[in-house]
Image (spheres, helix red, strand yellow):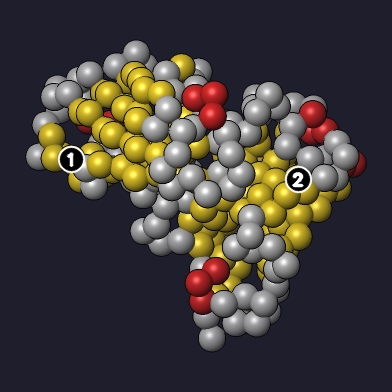
Amino acid sequence: QVQLVQSGAEVKNPGASVKVSCKASGYTFTYYAMHWVRQAPGQRPEWMGWINPGNHNTEYSQKVQGRVTFTTDTSATTVYMELSSLRSEDTAVYYCVRDSGRDWLLEHWGQGILVTVSS
Amino acid sequence: EIVLTQSPGTLSLSPGERATLSCRASQSVSSTYLAWYQQKPGQAPRLLIYGASTRATGIPDRFSGSGSGTDFTLTVSRLEPEDFAVYYCHQYGNSPLTFGQGTKVEIK
């Protein structure tokens, strides 16, 4: 079965960077895009973008473009999300989400990582 | 960007009652790429419905979705205790992907 296991919670100072991971298993890693979605406390989910592990193509939302980078390690079937120049508004739970492979349907969700930005 | 607006914000109902949740899009959602998710506190969203009306694997048939274009509905025919949660509609046909602000279904 599809499993997405994310790394642990992070606490960062404003202006710092954070890099979180998402280990995938139970399917062919390079066949499906991985999206990142974040959710601030009490807010709706917010889509950040996706990466295609097969060809490393990426798309980032305008809101985070320039501060976010998605990468993959195919041998480790792991996807990484790095967010720089952190500010308090970046405090959220960050989810990796595998799509359906046919379209951008967000089908399988990781457990989420709480990233807290605070001085 | 497609803006999704859900109503009502909160629905107060009793177990066994019918819940009807609405989602309106600011422009037509292409090829009915509209999904519904359920979220409970401390958990990731769980996919319920995709393609506006297709239940995801393992979702009970008391959940149903309908609609097209800009108006969509999620119906829970008879609420079970485990159905009290927040529900989000989501469009995945246009970038950026967007979510509604959520409807909380609470116990009356």
Q: What secondary structure is marked by label 2? A: strand
Q: Judge left or right: residue B72 versus residue B52.
A: left
**Where residue B102 sits: x, y (%)?**
34, 45
Q: Give the CA distance from mark 1 to mark 2.
A: 37 Å
Q: Residue tagged by mark 2?
A: A51
Q: Are marks 1 and 2 in contact (CB under 8 Å)?
A: no
Front residue (pair B62, A9): B62
Q: Give the vertical position of A65 relative to B54 (above or below).
A: below
**Where residue B40 sits: x, y (%)?**
36, 43
At label 2, the amino acid type is Ile
- Dot 2 falls on which chain? A
Q: For the residues tagged 1 and 2, is the chain the same?
A: no
Q: Can the viewer see residue A30?
A: yes
At label 1, the amino acid type is Leu
Q: Residues within 10 Å of mark 1 (few under 14, many from 20)?
A: some
**Where residue B13 sits: x, y (%)?**
13, 34
Q: Can the viewer see residue A21?
A: no
Front residue (pair B100, B57): B100
